[in-house]
Structure formats: structure tokens, C-alpha cells
């Protein structure tokens, strides 16, 4: 990750000059609901000549309070920082969520932030935001503390889609079912992952469908299966492809780690080993399955490519 996209913590932050407008939240996945909070901070900062910032946390609090059943993240912190910078934020602060930080009393929260961010002018949160020791703080307490500290507090209503709140939990459920298109609608952008191309065992090439293996180990995993995708390097053009994400039961005799393998459609040079790529997941084609023979697998991959080509003609 470049220095441009490296996040600060509250211990070493150097806020930009001018009134600071701070969106606060976990913001896992930075979905449409999160974007509403972040855009409120960004709009106010641009209107008032200030700076727009985000305060987020890592690891997820569940790692501390229920380590046996932690919440699995949609985005690693580096990807989230990069995304927020691309979104337009001037500063991204990733605060380590430690036991000491978790003990901070809710009524002291804004004073704690003001000490580390002296130019803090306003904070922006979702209407269900909870904070402080025991999650005792809510928006009403934040408003009262804001008056004492001279900090404006803006609460943004939860966004709903088809009558239900947009949430990271809902998106995780959709990914686990393979409903990648619905997950992207709630995210507000096409679901994607990033990683480096790594050498493989050339199994796809032996079948007549060479693949790029992308180093990617998500916490919240999409359903194992075959997807229509598009892929590009940082400076390259988009290439259409068919990706298999899963454990490759036809060719692996022992339980294997999930792997993302992408076969590029059409002509053109493929990214080389160690090239960093972004893969956008467009549509779920079918679940992963074990085939009786490699020839049966080869015929199915050919059908997957035809199905993907038909899909690409529609979008």
C-alpha cells in the first residue's frame, strides 16, 4: 500500500488545516448506508472550506468481545483506506480497537477526540451509532457532549432497500448465497477484490483454459462457484473473464485452501506473475462441484465461457 493510502491512528494523526468534518463508524464494506454518512461529512467540508475525514476501527470489536465468533470483514483495512481515499476523503484514521480504547467512557468520547483532533468541528454518524464502554453511548449522548465541546453532531438516517436496512450483515449473507449482483446493489459499487497474481500448477492450461491465480484470502467469503468477472492491472484495461472461487474438488485430493482462478476471455496479453490486479465480480454462474473426470470438467468450463460471453453481451 502506498504512503498516499496509509491510514493514521489517533496516536499519530496529523489532521489537515481547517475545520475538520469527521465521519465515524466501522464502515465495513463502505456500502450505500455508510456512504450516506461519509458524503454528509464530505459535503459539509467542501461547503465550509474544511477537511473531510473518516474515523474507523481495526480489528472489529467482535475480535475483542467474542473472539470465538468474530464478525468476518468484507474489506481488509488497507482496501478500505484506499477506497475511502478514492471516495474523496482528505484523511482516514484507523484506530486500533484495544481493551484500553474499549474502556473509554461514552461521556468522555468527544473530549478524547477533540484532544487528538483540535480542529474537530463536526462529527457524522449513523442513527444507530453506539460507542464508549459497554456501548453505553448513543446519538442523544453524542449531541449533549457535542454542545459541551463546541462540536456539531449530525445523525444520518439508516438507508433502506426493499424495506430492509442496508447493512454489512445483509451483504455478507448475500455473498454467502452467491447473490453477487444483489450484494453489489447494496454496496453501491461492483463487488471487487485485489491481489497479486501468483504462480499456479498450470492445471487450467492443461485443460485448455489457462487461468490467473490471484492471492486473496477474504474473511467474509463469497459462495464457492463460477462467476463472470472482469479484471485489470493498475494501469491496464479491463479484460472479461470467468473465475472459479473455491477448493477445486475435481483436481484436489485433499482439502485445499480456497483459490480465485480467472480465465480471461478474448485475445490479449495476460498480467504476469506478481502483477497486482483488481477483479470485479459481475454475476454468479453456477456452484462449484466435483466432476467425475477432467474431460467432464473441461466441457463444463467451455459451457461456462459461453454463458459468460452471453452475459457480457447484455451488459
Image (tube, grey):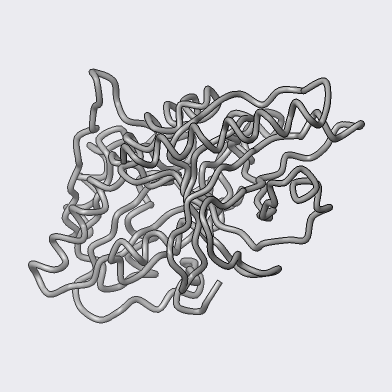
**Left or right of residue 169, residue 257 in this image:** right
Number of numbered labels in the structure image: 0
Q: Residue at x 16, y 55 (%)?
A: 152
Residue at the left extreme of this rendering: 47
Question: Where's the N terminus, which quadrant?
Answer: bottom right
* Vertical order, 188 against 92 (above or below): above
**Left or right of residue 58, residue 168 in this image:** left
**Left or right of residue 250, residue 285 in this image:** left
Q: Nearer the viewer, residue 47 or 2?
A: 2
Q: Residue at x 58, y 68 (%)?
A: 269
Image coords of residue 216 (percent x, y): 65, 51
Q: Nearer the viewer, residue 311 or 254?
A: 311
Q: Residue at x 28, y 20 (%)?
A: 164
Q: Quadrant of residue 188?
A: top left
Image coords of residue 275 (percent x, y): 63, 69
Q: Residue at x 45, y 78 (%)?
A: 4
Question: Where's the C terminus, which quadrant?
Answer: top left
Image coords of residue 137 (percent x, y): 35, 38
* Vertical order, 291 against 258 (above or below): above
**Left or right of residue 48, residue 141 in this image:** right
Amino acid at each position: 500500500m502506498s504512503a498516499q493510502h496509509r491510514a493514521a491512528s489517533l496516536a499519530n494523526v496529523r489532521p489537515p488545516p481547517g475545520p475538520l468534518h469527521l465521519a465515524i463508524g466501522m464502515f465495513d464494506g463502505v456500502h450505500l448506508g455508510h456512504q450516506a454518512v461519509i458524503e454528509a461529512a464530505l459535503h459539509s467540508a467542501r461547503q465550509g472550506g474544511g477537511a473531510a475525514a473518516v474515523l474507523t476501527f481495526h480489528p472489529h470489536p467482535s475480535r475483542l468481545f467474542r473472539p470465538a465468533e468474530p464478525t468476518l470483514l468484507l474489506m481488509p483495512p488497507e482496501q478500505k483506506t484506499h477506497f475511502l481515499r478514492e471516495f474523496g476523503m482528505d484523511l482516514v484514521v484507523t484506530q486500533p480497537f484495544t481493551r484500553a480504547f474499549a474502556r473509554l467512557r461514552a461521556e468522555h468520547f468527544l473530549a478524547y477526540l477533540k484532544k487528538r483532533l483540535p480542529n474537530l468541528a463536526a462529527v457524522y454518524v449513523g442513527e444507530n451509532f453506539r460507542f464508549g464502554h459497554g456501548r453505553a453511548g448513543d446519538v442523544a449522548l453524542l449531541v449533549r457532549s457535542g454542545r459541551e465541546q463546541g462540536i456539531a453532531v449530525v445523525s444520518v438516517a439508516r438507508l433502506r432497500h426493499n424495506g430492509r436496512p442496508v447493512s454489512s450483515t445483509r451483504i455478507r449473507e448475500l455473498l454467502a448465497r452467491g447473490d453477487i449482483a444483489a450484494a453489489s446493489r447494496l454496496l453501491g459499487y461492483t463487488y471487487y477484490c485485489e491481489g497479486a497474481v501468483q504462480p499456479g500448477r498450470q492445471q487450467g492450461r492443461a485443460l485448455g483454459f489457462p487461468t490467473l491465480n490471484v492471492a486473496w484470502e477474504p474473511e467474509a467469503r463469497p459462495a464457492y462457484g463460477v462467476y463472470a468477472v472482469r479484471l485489470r492491472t493498475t494501469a491496464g484495461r479491463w479484460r472479461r473473464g470467468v473465475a472459479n472461487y473455491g477448493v477445486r474438488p475435481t483436481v484436489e485430493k485433499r482439502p485445499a485452501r480456497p483459490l480465485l482462478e480467472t480465465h480471461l476471455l478474448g485475445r490479449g496479453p495476460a498480467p504476469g506473475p506478481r502483477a497486482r490486479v483488481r477483479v470485479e465480480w459481475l454475476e454468479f454462474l453456477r456452484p462449484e462441484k466435483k466432476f467425475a473426470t477432467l474431460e467432464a470438467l473441461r466441457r463444463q468450463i467451455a459451457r461456462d465461457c459461453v454463458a459468460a460471453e452471453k452475459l457480457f453481451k447484455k451488459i
